[in-house]
Amino acid sequence: MKKLNFITHNKNKYLEAKILAQEYNIDINWINVEYDEIQHYNLDVIAKKSCEIIQEKKIVEGEYFVEDAGLFIESLNSFPGPFSAYCYSTIGNQGILNLMTNENNRKAYFKSVIAYTFEEGITLFTGITNGEITNEMRGEKGFGFDPIFLHLDSDRTFAEMSLKEKNLYSHRQKSLRKMFALFSLRL
């Protein structure tokens, strides 16, 4: 089985990647190390710069990938976007629902950007999943904004789905599948 290093502090992201990687006969090695992450309004810039920082500080040798994601809400001018982790840790799901009180336009999307570092450089992979913000939190599974995000082709939030089912629709699985396909071709 081929092995690929994933640098993240988020165990849930790792588990999503690990399950999906099995379809490609890839084993994900979780590397939970500290590194500086810049603040920026663009997920592509954040992901790429994270890889550059890891390379410069020689935190990890060889090939690896990082992933950054955000929830973009149309009526909130794409807030929280790349600041989703901070938003979640400060106001959480209920805070987003409070901001959306009496808002009819509930369109939103999740975006995932993977930066994959290998000998030839850094390659970015993007996945987007469109949906809407619910009026209340629903579901016990998932993490982050999963309880308030309703995928367009489903009547359930990500938090109401099993991890395997979420991996059929999620933004992260879309970017991961693109990367896994390339990684499989390179070996």
Image (cartoon, grey):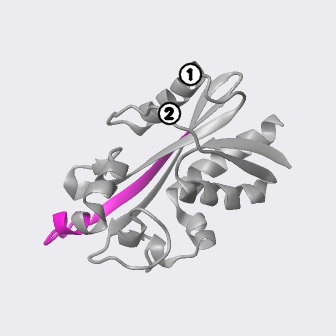
Q: Nearer the viewer, residue 76 or 94?
A: 94
Note whether 12 is above or below 58 in the view shown: below
The number of discs equals 2
Left or right, 102 with reference to 123: left
Tag 2 and tag 1, C-beta contact below 8 Å: yes
| Residue 114 in the image, given as x and y percentages of width and height | 55, 41
The label on residue 173 is none
Residue 89, located in which quarter of the rendered image?
A: bottom left
What is the magenta range? 96-114
| Residue 58 in the image, given as x and y percentages of width and height | 62, 23
Q: Circle 2 sits in a helix, a strand or a loop, which is it?
A: loop
Amino acid type shown at disc 1: Lys
In magenta segment, residue 101? yes
The label on residue 57 is 1
Q: Residue at x 51, y 56 (%)?
A: 171
Residue 32 seen in the figure:
yes
Q: Nearer the viewer, residue 9 or 103?
A: 9
Q: Nearer the viewer, residue 113 or 159?
A: 159
Residue 173, located in which quarter of the rendered image?
A: bottom right
Note whether 94 is above or below 49 in the view shown: below
The residue that mark 2 highlights is 35
| Residue 95 in the image, given as x and y percentages of width and height | 22, 64
Left or right, 24 with reference to 52: right
